[in-house]
Image (cartoon, rainbow, N blue to C red):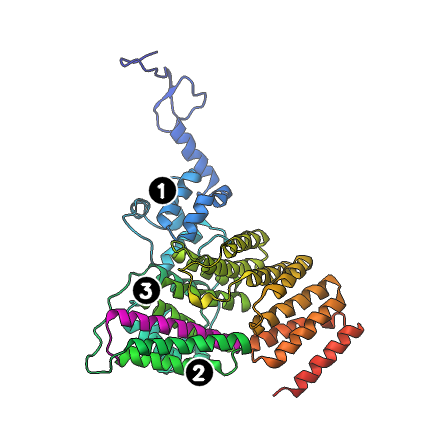
Amino acid sequence: MLNQRGHGVASKSGRQCRGCGCQLSQYNPDDQCAACSRLASQSQQGSPSVPVRVWRDGEVQRALAAWDFGRVSRLVRQRGSLRQGDMAELTGLSQAFLSMLESGARRLTNIDKIIEFLQGLDVPPDIAPLHLPGRVAATVPQSAVDPLSGDLDPALPWTPGRMVTALDIAVGGDALDRRKFLTVSGVALTAYAHHWGTTDAEPWYEATQTSAKVSARTLSALHGIIDDLRMTDAGAGSGTLAKLGRDHLRLIRGFLRNGTYTEETGRELAAIAADTAAQTGWFYFDAGDHERAQIYLLAALRAAHASGDVRLGAGALSYLAIYGYSTGNPRDAVSAARSAREKTKSLHTPALEAMLLTRQARGHAKLGEQQGALAVLGRAAELCAQGRSEQDPPWLYWVNEGEIYGQSGSCFLDLGDAQRAVTSLAKAHAALNPTDHRTRGLFLTRAASAYLRQGDVEAGCDSAHEALDLAEQLQSHRLNEHVETMLNDLHAVGDSTYAQELLDRAATLAGAGP
């Protein structure tokens, strides 16, 4: 029948809902209204949950990667047919806060609350923007320094003064015993990346006018030194470069603390400090001093933030990504690379984006996530083919086709695809810069392992001999570790004449070492 406005209305059946007592429609064959049926269904099912299909939604994944938790809440609620009350029950956040979060009136910035939010929704670890810890916390020595406390706390203001404090800790101006430093990983590492990427820039303080003025010539000289150290590292390995980098950073810290300069010059100094701290952290990592390396890289994040150049922060996070997948924390590599990519996505920097994608791919491969690794490797190759842009940082001179092939081959090796690893690493060998000896040595060790795992002992030994030739010339603990992995693969075919000759050579070199 029609109401006074001409619209149809359902006739009443004379029956009442056994739940709330309202009149039931004649078209409703049940003894409950729709609202009571929904409540009864939820009661039978227990606590609400997010359907698995929601996490396959590309828009949801992009919101997670962007740390846009208001959009995540809204999309999960809509895609999962959940009510705001369900979301409150899952996350532990109030309905009022969730409403403001979804509208953009509030932000979720506390790292503990972010973790509770993600864990409550049961976000799969492969798309979570940070590492989600298990319910049982690992036991650490009470003497260890908590990386989220004291002067190292990333929640402290990201001011130029805090940057100098971080540099003090890195170069030894603070009494921190690095042997007691708790390695930054998982939630702690994500906290640094999050604060670097979301904290607003702080104003620079007034430098004292009674000290020496920092000139353009001084800035150029300071920048030139770290460039020279970087080129030396690529050709000869870190060796003693870590101490030279440390001493250079001490000099820069001195100018920051005691020099006279404008805000513009101060930001340039901070940029040089960020570059030097990141590169020195890399020197220490290549030399095998991993804990010290992290302290420098975290200081580099603060200096990069003070400089206003997000590319430098992305560079520090790329080193932290390598640290992650090289030390048994590949999920950290994925998280660090994603954070860097999110912060730099508005820049037209194809070389930087390609490099970060290879770091993310290595993390995926170490986790056995083949689809994720191949997807980002494909995108990295596309970006590399575009060539460098004017916005790409000059310190990324080494990103080329050979680097992309080499990282692809490394991913294939980790994924157990020796044949594709051999193909990619052979292309890398042909395309790499001839002066980048350490990278060439690293890729040769992986090519040797790939050949050996494929059953081609002769080709594997040929690549291994080339790798040993370079290892003899370079001072790189990291390369030596890769040589050891390669030799372990050789032991599996030790009865081969080729393999035995190589093992004998390696033993002789080890005996002649310092």
Asked whether residue 495 appears in the rendered view, the answer is: no
The question of residue 265 being in magenta is answered with yes
Sequence-wise, the earlier of marks 1 and 2 is 1
Sequence-wise, the earlier of marks 3 and 2 is 2
Asked whether residue 393 appears in the rendered view, the answer is: yes
Label 2 sits on a secondary structure element that is helix
Q: Which mark is residue 85?
A: 1
**Badge 2: residue crowd in 10 Å (few <14, some 14–19, many ≥20):** some
- Residue at the outermost left position: 209
Q: Which mark is residue 308?
A: 3
Name the side, left or right, on which 8 lies relative to 365: left
Question: How far from the left and from the top, in percent, is residue 335?
Answer: 46, 59
The question of residue 281 being in magenta is answered with yes
**Badge 1: residue crowd in 10 Å (few <14, some 14–19, many ≥20):** some
Label 3 sits on a secondary structure element that is loop
Sequence-wise, the earlier of marks 1 and 3 is 1
Q: Which residue is mark 2?
A: 244
| Magenta extent | 259-287
Nearer the observer, 322 or 208? 208
Residue drawn at (57%, 70%), measured in percent from left and top?
Answer: 439
What separation in Å lies between label 3 and label 2 (alpha carbons)? 26 Å
Q: Amino acid at mark 1?
A: Gly
Q: Quadrant of residue 212?
A: bottom left
Q: Amino acid at mark 3?
A: Gly
